[in-house]
Structures are given as structure tokens and as C-alpha cells.
């Protein structure tokens, strides 16, 4: 069953950006997600880097996940 409410790694509450960036970077058809801090840890970067990537996709208007 799909879990759109909490991070599957740490249990933190998820928001639309958490879900969208997970689908963009990991698996478009995902039904379980990681929060932004867990995703940043997985990729070995800072939370700020993931947030900047989200802003880039949102501003570009090209990705339907961030509309």
C-alpha cells in the first residue's frame, strides 16, 4: 500500500516537495518515499543542495512533478 505520509527511512512527515524530488531522482513510479534530509544523506550532499535542485525544477517549469 502506498505511503504518502511519512518517510520510509526515519518516519518524518512528508510534504509535496519530498515526494516530487524522490520521484525525480530515485523512481518515478515510487509509492514509498524518503524525506529531503534522508535523501540528501543517501546522495552524500547537503539538504540545501536538494532544496536548490527543487527550486531549479520549479522555476524551470519543465518538470510536471513541481507544478
Image (tube, rainbow, N blue to C red):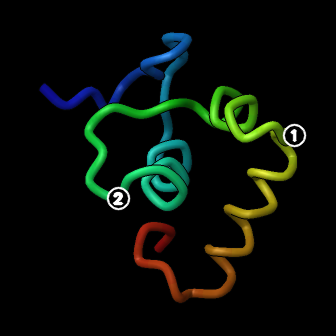
The quarter holding residue 25 reads: bottom right
Crowding near the residue tagged with mark 1, few <14, some 14–19, many ≥20 C-alpha atoms within 10 Å: few
Q: Are marks 1 and 2 in contact (CB under 8 Å)?
A: no
Q: Is residue 36 above or below residue 27?
A: above
Q: In terms of secondary structure, where does tag 2 sit?
A: loop
From the viewer's perspective, is 17 left or right of 59? left
How far across and how far down the image is residue 29, in percent? 26, 54
Crowding near the residue tagged with mark 2, few <14, some 14–19, many ≥20 C-alpha atoms within 10 Å: few
Q: In terms of secondary structure, where does tag 1 sit?
A: loop
From the viewer's perspective, is 46 left or right of 17? right
The quarter holding residue 32 reads: top left
Quick one: which residue is furthest to the left in this view? 1
Distance from Cα at disc 1 to Cα at disc 2: 22 Å
* Numbered tag placed on residue 57 in the rendering: none
State the residue in front, 26 or 3: 26
The residue pinned by badge 2 equals 28
Residue at 36% across, 25% down: 5
The residue pinned by badge 1 equals 46
From the viewer's perspective, is 2 left or right of 12? left
State the residue in front, 65 or 39: 39
Name the quarter where the N terminus is drawn.
top left
Amino acid at each position: 500500500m502506498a505511503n504518502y505520509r511519512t518517510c520510509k527511512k526515519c518516519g518524518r512527515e512528508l510534504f509535496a516537495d519530498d515526494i516530487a524530488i524522490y520521484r525525480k531522482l530515485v523512481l518515478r513510479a515510487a509509492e514509498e518515499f524518503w524525506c529531503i534530509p534522508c535523501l540528501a544523506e543517501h546522495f552524500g550532499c547537503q539538504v540545501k543542495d536538494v532544496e536548490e535542485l527543487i527550486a531549479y525544477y520549479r522555476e524551470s517549469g519543465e518538470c510536471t512533478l513541481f507544478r
